[in-house]
Image: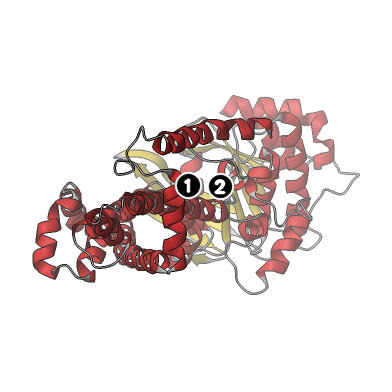
Amino acid sequence: MGVSLGKPALVPPLSPPVAADRGELVLRGVAKGFGGKPVLADLDLQIPAGQFVAVVGRSGGGKTTLLRLIAGLETPDAGTIALDGTPRHGLQRDVRLMFQDARLLPWQRLLGNVGIARGPDWRQRAENLLAEVGLAGRENDWPYTLSGGQRQRVALARALVTEPGILLLDEPFGALDALTRIEMHRLLIRVWSQHRFTALLITHDVAEAVALADRVLVLRDGAVAQDMLIEAPRAERSLRAAELERRILAAV
Amino acid sequence: MKRGLMSWLLPLLLIASWESAVRLGWLSARILPAPSDVAIAFWGAVRDGTLQHHVAISTGRALAGLAIGGTIGFLLGLVNGALPLAEDLLDSTLQMLRNIPHLAIIPMVILWFGIGEEAKIFLVAVGVLFPVYLHTFHGIRSVDRGLVEMGRVYGLGPLALYGRVILPGALPSILIGLRYALGIMWLTLIVAETISASSGIGYMTMNAREFLQTDMVLLGILIYALLGKLADLAARWLERRALAWDPHLGTGLEAA
């Protein structure tokens, strides 16, 4: 475990200005099957607070099931999922999920979509988050006026408006064009370094995993086949990306 | 502008030739009164207030029936859409009842209620209940599951989920149901008022028939057409306002 690829960093890595104090995730012996067919078997996983983890693997390797278990949309057949030291069941306020499609409510303006959970001074918080994802002044627009990338920006703002400890991302950039995807990567890293949540990103795109994550997990046949730390600062990764990608692809 | 004028050409021509056919004696006023006679009848009925009186009564009946039947249909659709148990219990029965043409129960209705107001309101209520029920039920069932899942992940309780996700998602279908209901509402009322009434447009029309006042009969028919058109316009207006988020409706493009 933990193959270190970092050379001595001259530029300090884009790492916590403040250490994340919540969002630690511990899975112990988690198993889940559908119709008698096991999808995840006896999975142990420990993710420290504030880490950015990418999960790669083939379709059917259990990536989405893992995400839905952590989100509380599925119940494990065995094992426990603990969040900040407390075992938990069902949906949690502290965990938010970004879907492949943005899933905005077409009948709510952007402000209402971001502030969907309402709560005290939700308007102000939603407005701040919209500004943070680069959509200031669009509060009263309808979702149908947005491009695909803008829709995912709104979805990101909606996920962060309640300051979750954990953000789960289910291939949210898969349907975007290459340039928009790079913009979204920058945005995601920026908000991650500011809000200090734990990020768990599912992706088919190994290059995306290498560009964004502190740690890449390869999931194969319901088990972790490779667990790799990437310590190189994000700005320097393009130089080493080919080597990293080769090693990850070998494990997929 | 020019094309707008063109579309009026044929109706105007028809009215003009109809008017002259009656004036020249080719068409008996007993069969079809001249448009000018209908206009005069209209003016007379407005001046002595009979028209307003009957229209108000008919509209009151129509709206009362719509409110009762629509509410029941909406609540049934809501309950059956939300609770599988209620669907198992009620839906097949409602589907069976739906197949009875509601006008076929007029003899029973007269036996139950006589020929009073209740009979007409009851008939309208029964008529509008089913389209509202079916479209509410169908609308709730066809709300995007992904949006409902999103709502749950983002912490919406059952009430908020209904208020912010499920009902708005079902609204386009519910409004279509309402438009069908409005059509059925006037149709039912015409039949009910024609069979038995002592007031309302149907009564006014049937009464005029007994005195061979064909201009008043024709006026009654035109008033029904006008009220139907107004109800449809109101429904479309409501649709455009309530569905402003839908690019196909909200921008003012007419839906088919």
Left or right for B197, reference A20: left
Q: Considering depth in this image, is B114 or A33 the residue closer to the camera?
A: B114
Who's the residue at 42% across and 66% down the image?
B52
Q: Are marks 1 and 2 on the same chain?
A: no
Q: Residue A103 has which mark?
A: 2
In this rendering, is residue A47 above or below B162? above
Tell me how the rendering is colored: secondary structure
Q: Which secondary structure, mark 1?
A: helix
In this rendering, is residue B236 above or below A95? above
Seen as rendered, the residue at the extreme front is B24
Estimate how packed mark 2 is, as few (under 14), some (14 to 19) or many (20 or more) residues with alpha carbons within 10 Å. many
Who's the residue at 22% across and 56% down the image?
B210
Badge 1 amino acid: Gly
Q: Which secondary structure, mark 2?
A: loop
- Marked residue chain, label 1: B
Q: Position of residue B12 (x, y in %)?
A: 53, 36
Residue B45, image quadrant = bottom left
Seen as rendered, the residue at the extreme right is A10
Q: Considering depth in this image, is A184 or B42 the residue closer to the camera?
A: B42
Q: Position of residue B252 (x, y in %)?
A: 61, 45
Q: Considering depth in this image, is B151 or B127 the residue closer to the camera?
A: B127
Who's the residue at 80% across and 35% down the image?
A237
Seen as rendered, the residue at the extreme bottom is A120
Left or right for A244, reference B186: right
- Residue for badge 1: B146
Estimate how packed mark 1 is, as few (under 14), some (14 to 19) or many (20 or more) residues with alpha carbons within 10 Å. some
Q: How many marks?
A: 2
Q: Residue B125 has which mark?
A: none
Q: Position of residue A107 (x, y in %)?
A: 56, 53
- Asked if one can make out residue B15 in the rendered structure from this viewpoint, the answer is yes
- Marked residue chain, label 2: A
